[in-house]
Image (cartoon, rainbow, N blue to C red):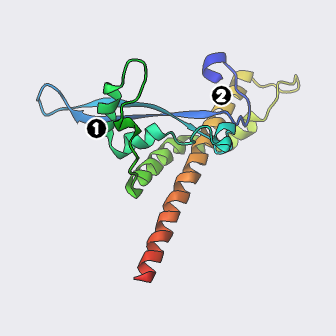
């Protein structure tokens, strides 16, 4: 809403975060240099997003997991998609997500979250202000604070899920070690 309409709602369950991922690949000219190639922008959602709760959409998109688990294959499949948007059979294949993939995404989300944590308290205070005439506050500042707060909430929600996955993996490893 901020980008399209210039305003934001406070604590909006429909907020999302566009996580853009790129990979480094050797340049086509054979120079030994590397270039960046975009894997795409993947929309992360809050855990309390109505579509996530209903099971209609994934909080962390399946395409993001595909891109992380095998970036080269993801680029190849993405390039070979039919013009009408139909996926190839390879794109429909089962995902093989390792704990290292989860940890990679977890660390990426942590890095993206860190700037939003620096302004957290100020953003929450500012975001809660209303447009009453008693406030001598520029509403643009309120909307920017609401936007940053929304981005922070989405990333914190994703981080919570990713940490629970790594914690479950550690528990499973501990149980396997104990039974050995």
Image location of residue 61, percent across then percent down: 51, 39
Q: Are marks 2 and 1 in contact (CB under 8 Å)?
A: no
* Mark 2 or mark 1: whose residue is earlier in sequence: 1
Image location of residue 3, percent across then percent down: 60, 20
Comparing 129 with 2, the one in front is 2
The residue where tag 2 is placed is: 144
Q: Secondary structure at mark 2?
A: helix
Report crowding for label 2: few under 14, some 14 to 19, many 20 or more residues within 10 A (C-alpha): some
Report crowding for label 1: few under 14, some 14 to 19, many 20 or more residues within 10 A (C-alpha): some
Comparing 152 with 79, the one in front is 79
* Depicted 79 relative to depicted 100: above or below: above
Q: From the viewer's perspective, is the residue at label 2 or at label 1 nearer?
A: 1
Question: Can residue 168 be seen by looking at this rendering?
Answer: yes
Question: Can residue 119 be seen by looking at this rendering?
Answer: no
Residue at the (56%, 34%) spot, across then down? 17
Comparing 56 with 175, the one in front is 56
Q: Residue furthest left?
A: 30
Q: How many marks?
A: 2
Residue at the (52%, 64%) spot, across then down? 168
Q: Judge from the rendering whether residue 101 lies leftward or rightward of residue 131; answer left or right.
A: left
Image location of residue 165, percent across then percent down: 52, 58
Quadrant of the image occupied by residue 9:
top right
Quadrant of the image occupied by residue 48:
top right
Residue at the (67%, 39%) spot, across then down? 49
Locate the N terminus and report the quarter of the image it occupies: top right
Locate the C terminus and report the quarter of the image it occupies: bottom left
The residue where tag 1 is placed is: 72
- Cα–Cα gap, marks 2 and 1: 37 Å
Instruction: Residue 49: give its label.
Output: none
* Depicted 63 relative to depicted 136: above or below: below
Residue at the (24%, 35%) spot, across then down? 25
Q: Secondary structure at mark 1?
A: helix
């Amino acid at each position: 809403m901020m980008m399209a309409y210039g305003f934001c709602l406070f604590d909006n369950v429909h907020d999302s975060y566009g996580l853009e991922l790129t990979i480094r690949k050797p340049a086509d000219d054979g120079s030994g240099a590397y270039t960046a190639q975009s894997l795409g922008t993947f929309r992360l959602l809050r855990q309390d997003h109505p579509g996530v709760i209903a099971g209609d959409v994934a909080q962390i998109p399946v395409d993001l997991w595909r891109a992380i688990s095998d970036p080269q294959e993801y680029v190849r499949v993405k390039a070979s998609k039919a013009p009408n948007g139909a996926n190839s059979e390879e794109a429909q294949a089962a995902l093989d997500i390792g704990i290292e993939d989860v940890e990679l995404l977890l660390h990426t989300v942590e890095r993206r979250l860190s700037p939003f944590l620096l302004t957290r308290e100020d953003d929450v205070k500012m975001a809660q202000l209303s447009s009453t005439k008693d406030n001598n506050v520029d509403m643009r500042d309120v909307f920017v604070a609401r936007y940053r707060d929304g981005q922070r909430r989405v990333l914190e929600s994703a981080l919570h899920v990713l940490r629970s996955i790594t914690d479950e993996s550690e528990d499973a490893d501990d149980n396997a070690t104990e039974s050995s």
